[in-house]
Image: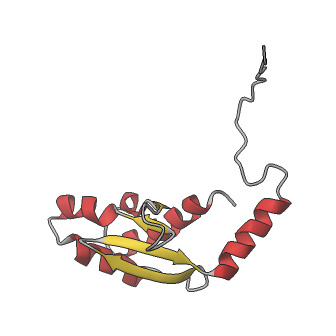
């Protein structure tokens, strides 16, 4: 299933692409302002430089292209073009249930595992 931010990045990247922009601008990360939202995407600010367009307009087009109403509780624009994302509680619960049922608790396995010895001396 992957990380929550990774899943959201896939969804938001597809929205940027649907809106006519490069998908790489759809990177989602944990919010710097948890009082406003859980996750954020700042890609419209960077995209505005390349496309010579108002970043808020780019963000609005990406938000308009977003589907997945079962994932999001609220999506809002803030400032010059930040996309603020708050997730639906049911979606979060499903993700947590997946993590709890996974042998590795949702963490990706490394291709070449190594042993690490910790010595308390």
Left or right relative to 2: residue 44? left
Q: Is residue 75 above or below residue 39?
A: below
Given the current orientation, which residue lies at the most extreme top position? 121
Given the current orientation, which residue lies at the most extreme front position? 121
| Picture coordinates of residue 87, whole percent (x, y) | 57, 77
> How was this image coloured?
secondary structure
Q: Is residue 74 above or below residue 31?
A: below
| Picture coordinates of residue 116, whole percent (x, y) | 76, 23
Q: Is residue 73 above or below residue 79?
A: below
Image quadrant assignment for residue 99: bottom right
Left or right relative to 94: residue 36? left
| Picture coordinates of residue 43, whole percent (x, y) | 34, 62
Residue plotted at (34% across, 78% down) = 77
Asked whether residue 67 is in view, the answer is no
Left or right relative to 56: residue 85? right
Left or right relative to 69: residue 105? right
Asked whether residue 106 is in view, the answer is yes
Image quadrant assignment for residue 45: bottom left
> Toward the viewer: 76 or 27?
76
Image quadrant occupied by the N terminus: bottom right
Image quadrant occupied by the C terminus: top right
| Picture coordinates of residue 18, whole percent (x, y) | 39, 75
> Toward the viewer: 55 or 73?
73
Residue plotted at (46% across, 62% down) = 28
Count of all numbered marks drawn on residues in the image: 0
Residue plotted at (41% across, 63% down) = 26
Residue plotted at (77% across, 21% down) = 118
């Amino acid at each position: 299933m992957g990380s929550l931010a990774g899943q959201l990045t896939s969804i938001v990247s597809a929205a940027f692409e649907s809106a006519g922009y490069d998908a790489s601008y759809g990177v989602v990360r944990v919010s710097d302002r948890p009082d406003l939202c859980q996750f954020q995407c700042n890609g419209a600010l960077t995209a505005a430089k390349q496309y010579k367009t108002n970043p808020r307009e780019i963000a609005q087009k990406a938000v308009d292209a977003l589907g997945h109403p079962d994932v999001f509780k609220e999506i809002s624009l803030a400032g010059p073009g930040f996309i603020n994302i708050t997730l639906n509680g049911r979606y979060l619960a499903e993700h947590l249930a997946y993590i709890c049922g996974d042998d590795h608790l949702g963490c990706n396995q490394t291709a070449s595992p190594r042993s690490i010895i910790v010595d308390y001396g």
